[in-house]
Image (tube, rainbow, N blue to C red):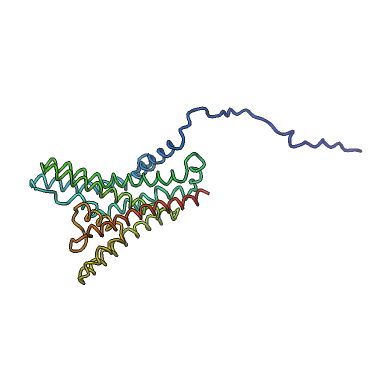
Amino acid sequence: MAVEHPAPTLPGDQTRIHNIGYRSYDGPRLGRSYARRSLYSQSLRGAYGLGRSVKSKVLPMLLFVVMCVPAAIMVAVAVATKANKLPLEYTGYAVVMQAVISLFVASQAPQSVSRDLRFKTVPLYFSRPIETADYVRAKFAALASALFVLTAAPLLVLYVGALLAKLDFADQTKGFAQGLVSVTLLSLLFAGLGLVIAAVTPRRGFGIAAVIAVLTISYGAVSTLQAIADAQGSTGATPWIGLFSPITLVDGVQSAFLGASSAFPGGIGPSQGEGVVYVLVALGLIAASYGLLMRRYRKVGL
């Protein structure tokens, strides 16, 4: 008895077209500049935990308060004692509070870039109109802006307090402007170095440890070598040793060109000729940091 077999079904016979309501987007296309601005603003907000969980806000906000409290205390003392000047120069505040600044960079630089590397979302950014240079510039500018807010806020507290204490307006305005120039350089330098170090690894913990190690060990080593050179009478070597730490670089620039008191041993900072070398090294490090970030994200975005 013959067995009937069903006719074979071709693959094309099983094809179905379902109308599930997809429609093309016909709204405004805001383009590359809007994407760059959005990435910058979100990264800047993220540096202070805004738009994130409460846990993410604790450390950056605490560090911000710690930066501002000593300035408020100095202002209160100046007003109460009717002092003729502030206890600390505007240009010296960031140098004294460098540990807090380093901790902020160490905590927020990996937060800015490590998650994108860890979860491999960087290629998704580059699949849109945004390009590698846009990503790097937005991240660099956001962290530098966050650092500027952190370091300029206490200077503003000092300035307002000095005016309330009726200190000389011209002197305080000049000192405040010099302090802003100093912290601008510091913000760019620390942001660049912090991002380069953090971009090496997708592990946030490793990034935090690496940034702290680079910033603190370099300063400790430079300060120790400067103290040894000063004790042995080799004062000429002291300014050149200061080229090997970010915070001493900033200190050297402001003491050479902004009339600031130097934190170097003996209070003797670099001359203006040596200060030119400090400026060139600082700008070179900022440019090199940008270049290294560009190279890193070109590879990651492939």
The image quadrant where one finds the N terminus is top right
Give the left or right position of residue 9, taking residue 293 as reference: right
Give the left or right position of residue 170, taking residue 224 as reference: left
**Residue that extends furthest to the bottom in the rendered view of this protein:** 232
* Tag count: 0
Quadrant hosting residue 14: top right
Residue 193 screen position, x and y as percent: 36, 54
Give the left or right position of residue 242, taking residue 7 as reference: left
Observer-nearest of 18 and 47: 47
Q: Does 171 appear above or below 221? A: above
**Residue that extends furthest to the left in the rendered view of this protein:** 82
Observer-nearest of 251 and 95: 251
Q: Image point 77% across, 36% down: which residue?
A: 10
Residue 158 screen position, x and y as percent: 18, 45
Q: Image point 24% across, 65% down: which residue?
A: 238
Q: Image point 45% across, 33% down: which residue?
A: 30
Residue 88 screen position, x and y as percent: 16, 51
**Residue that extends furthest to the right in the rendered view of this protein:** 1
Give the left or right position of residue 24, taking residue 296 as reference: right
Residue 45 screen position, x and y as percent: 35, 41
